[in-house]
């Protein structure tokens, strides 16, 4: 993993936008996997700004949503689909044919639905870049502690730590309870992306960052599976990086590689 330790959350979002825009410059029809958590939103806003200002052309990308709460429709303000449309795909003016979002209201054969989602990713040529946030318990997507590291898109029951965090930050202001289940790309789906970009900011993520980067690869910290990816980049602010034992080395390494790659 290549680890960038940046001054603050704004610097993380700007660096993330730089890396994504560079990929799209090299491949205009890039396929992007999109996380809908709070951390990547500033990155999306910066990419939209650059697109609208003519600094980056994202008009030909294809977008795949990473996850979704089950029981929430796409128009619900807390749904992942609503977040991605509002903050990214609609401002970019992407056509519906190139927007693929998981359906939280799907009723039917869930295994077949998930297999079809995987097939859609494959038909698009696979994910060129998967963008991730990081849960306080180490989850990526809604792949919670104890999940299969070899799993593909699947339904999942959310852990108590995720429920508590999301209840406080997302659903309490709406006066609603957080759904207890979701559907998510699996860890193996994420690892199959050609490149992975994980953003983590704030002191609340420091423990999960340290375990994901410097701990063993384990299903108890799903993000630790990124240690196995050949092209995974982690963008951290100082607070999120604070518990890394080798943080000074990572910082020096990233400066060197940024100048030489």
Image (cartoon, helix red, strand yellow):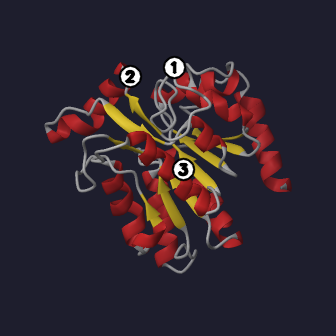
Residue that label 1 marks: 146
Task: Report helix, strand or loop for mark 3.
Answer: helix
C-alpha distance separating marks 1 and 3: 22 Å
Q: Are marks 1 and 2 in contact (CB under 8 Å)?
A: yes
Q: Earlier in the sequence, mark 1 or mark 3?
A: 3
Residue visible at 39% across and 51% down in the picture: 102
Task: Report helix, strand or loop for mark 1.
Answer: loop
Q: Earlier in the sequence, mark 1 or mark 2?
A: 1
- Residue 81: which disc? none
Question: Quick one: label 2, few (<14), some, or many (20+) residues within 10 Å?
Answer: some
Question: Quick one: label 3, few (<14), some, or many (20+) residues within 10 Å?
Answer: some
Q: Are marks 1 and 3 in contact (CB under 8 Å)?
A: no
Can residue 14 be seen here? The reply is no
Residue visible at 49% across and 56% down in the picture: 64
Residue that label 3 marks: 118
Residue that label 2 marks: 159
Q: Toward the viewer: 78 or 150? A: 150
């Amino acid at each position: 993993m290549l680890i960038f330790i940046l001054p603050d959350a704004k610097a993380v979002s700007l660096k993330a936008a730089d890396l994504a825009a560079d990929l799209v410059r090299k491949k205009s029809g890039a396929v992007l996997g999109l996380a809908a958590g709070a951390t990547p939103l500033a990155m999306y806003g910066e990419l939209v700004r650059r697109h609208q200002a003519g600094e980056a052309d994202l008009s030909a990308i294809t977008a795949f949503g990473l996850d979704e709460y089950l029981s929430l429709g796409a128009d619900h303000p807390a749904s992942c689909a609503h977040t991605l449309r509002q903050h990214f795909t609609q401002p970019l003016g992407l056509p519906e044919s190139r927007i693929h979002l998981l359906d939280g209201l799907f009723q039917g054969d869930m295994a077949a639905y998930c297999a079809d989602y995987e097939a859609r990713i494959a038909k698009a040529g696979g994910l060129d870049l998967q963008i991730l946030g990081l849960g306080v318990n180490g989850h990526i997507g809604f792949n919670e502690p104890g999940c299969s590291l070899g799993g593909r898109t699947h339904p999942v029951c959310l852990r108590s730590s995720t429920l508590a965090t999301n209840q406080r930050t997302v659903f309490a202001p709406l006066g609603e309870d957080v759904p207890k289940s979701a559907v998510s790309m699996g860890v193996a789906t994420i690892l199959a992306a050609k490149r992975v970009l994980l953003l983590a900011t704030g002191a609340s993520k420091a423990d999960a960052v340290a375990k994901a980067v410097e701990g063993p690869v384990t299903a108890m910290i799903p993000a630790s599976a990124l240690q196995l990816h050949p092209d995974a980049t982690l963008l951290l602010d100082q607070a999120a990086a604070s518990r890394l034992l080798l943080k000074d080395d990572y910082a020096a390494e990233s400066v060197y590689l940024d100048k030489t790659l």
